[in-house]
Image: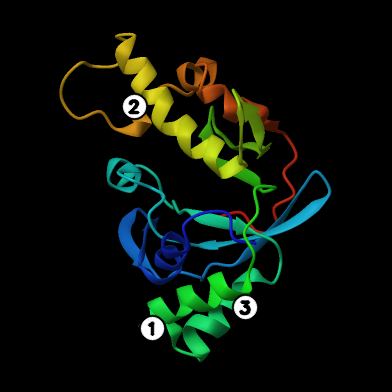
Amino acid sequence: NLTWSTEGVINEYCEPCEALVEGELRELPALEGLETFSLDGVTYEAFNTSGGLGSLAEVLAGKARNLNYKSVRYPGHCALMRTLLNDLNLRARRDLLKDVLEGAVPGTEQDVVVFFVTASGWRNGRLMQESYAGRVIGEHHGRGFWSAIQVTTAAGICTVLDLLAQGRLPQQGYVRQEEIALSDFLANRFGRAYAQGEPVRTPTLAQVA
């Protein structure tokens, strides 16, 4: 189903993806780096998409070895999009692809947002890994119903504005998203939408970058 901007999804699947590879800034092709994982008994796939890291790759260049951002979908999605964009060359005709998708794939408000973050590195002489995962579904707010993608998108924006208004962020200058403490974000009345996640001690990633 379509759950948000069709143009946005197409751009994510066509534009180059910023990443860190062996400590260096790189641009990777979208729809590559396919991997699978399981969460709460449901299998998903994830693959490179553009626009998700913001300034994080620049900040961690030379500090982190590998860093990437991937979109999570149900199995088979990546192969279908590769057929449309690569085999049928619709990446060169994005307006046509938009019309095809919106004319054939229904929209829905019964969506699910799944997030999975995993990091590995050395701590006290041991190679350790920590993961954080969760899923968000739509909610009733006020007089209306907000889909999962609406809730999570609005949460990211409204939390930062809330923290700024409370004086908990610098009142001038550029503030990167990674400078906001996760604990402050999750404790916020808007950011708690992401608090549905929980630490994962035994992740079931098929591949770990």
- How has the structure been colored for display? rainbow
The amino acid type of the residue labelled 2 equals: Glu
Residue 59 placement: quadrant = top left
Residue 115 drawn at (x, y percent): 60, 43
Label 2 Cα crowd, 10 Å radius (few <14 / some 14-19 / many 20+): few
User: Relative to 187, is 12 on the left or the right?
Assistant: left
Give the amino acid at mark 3: Leu
Residue at numbered disc 3: 80
Is 77 on the left-hand or right-hand side of 49? Answer: right
Q: Earlier in the sequence, mark 3 or mark 1?
A: 3
**Element class at badge 1:** loop
Q: Quadrant of residue 30?
A: bottom left
Mark 3–mark 2 Cα distance, whole angstroms, equals: 37 Å
Residue drawn 63% across the image and 63% down it: 35
Q: State the quadrant of the C terminus.
A: bottom right
Q: Nearer the viewer, mark 3 or mark 1?
A: 1
Res 161 → quadrant: top left
Q: Residue at x 50, y 90 (%)?
A: 88
